Amino acid sequence: MGNANALRIDQGSVAINQTCRQYSIVFDGCNYDLNSKSCVIPVKSRREVELYLLCLGEEVEIIMDDQVRETYPEVWDWLAGRDISEVLTELKWSYREEEEVIDIIEKIPAPPSLNACFLKLHNGDPDPERIEREYVHKNNAENVLISKPYQCGSMFYFNGFTKSPEFNIDHYSDHVEGIIMFEVARQAGNASAHLVGMPFTGTNIILKSFTRHTKFLEASEPYLVRTIPAYKPRGGVGYCVYNIIQNGKSCMAGFFSVIAYNSKDVYKRFRNSKLIDRAPREKVVGE
């Protein structure tokens, strides 16, 4: 059989990394039972494969057959005989694709391993520990609104909380207020930046944000926020796409595009200069 991680024929199908993977990427037209696994992700292009690989890393297998070989010959040539690790080394975030990635994040099913991790999925589960305040740029631990993270591929999962002394809602609500959801997402974005290498001496400026609400977030049920961070540890333009999930359904998705500084001194020089008045939207600042 050769390299066990390479593209190979197996019972009429072809797969990369077919054993012990949480996700299966399956091309449209492939003779494959889409109901045979809970984490099957259908795709129609190489670009979709690239984005899912960037999000999920080695948690993925790729399934193709002879029909797909005829329909997508360029993809077959790209993947044939290659190891997933080898493919991943040539893929990089562009740091300008957040609007593409937001259309991806809600399509990714929760990994099976999430059910066995420390995060709270049901009301009877214990609350996880909150992440250290430094990760979310808070002075007081009581203002932290996310848990310690669970990682799957390049994605991070956090429990979100609803109570913080920073927020005093002056009316009754049976759901979590949007301003709290936004702060939870912002904290998850900051934490994700540090988790992928941004030093705690750093900071960032939000250039653009987008939020899409699809369902009420119930105050009486636990919920998760997952992130796909695309930041460079050395600083510069980056982004974080996020998705707030409750009972397996998306309630909110969005992204933050930022300029990140790995030193507060560099940020202060920028903040006190005239550059702040003409901060570009399509050009890297601080790199």
Image: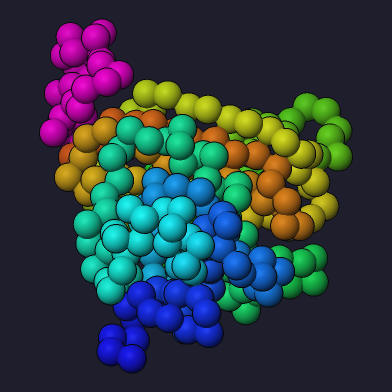
Examine the structure image and report whether residue 149 is included in the region drawn in magenta: no
Q: Is residue 88 left or right of residue 254?
A: left
Q: Is residue 40 left or right of residue 57?
A: right
The answer to whether residue 132 is visible is no
Relative to 135, residue 174 above or below: above
Q: Position of residue 167 (x, y in %)?
A: 64, 34
Q: Position of residue 2 (x, y in %)?
A: 28, 89
Q: Position of residue 98 (x, y in %)?
A: 42, 36
Residue at image location 15% in from the left, 30% down from the top = 286
| Range shown magenta | 264-287
**Rendered image coloring scheme:** rainbow
Q: Position of residue 237 (x, y in %)?
A: 27, 33
Q: Quadrant of residue 284?
A: top left
Q: Quadrant of residue 168?
A: top right
Q: Is residue 266 left or right of residue 258?
A: left
Depth check, front residue: 109 or 177: 109
Q: Is residue 138 left or right of residue 158?
A: left
Depth check, front residue: 11 or 54: 11
Residue at image location 26% in from the left, 8% down from the top = 277
Identify the image quadrant of the C terminus. Answer: top left
Relative to 96, residue 52 above or below: below
Examine the structure image and report whether residue 276 is included in the region drawn in magenta: yes
The answer to whether residue 78 is visible is yes
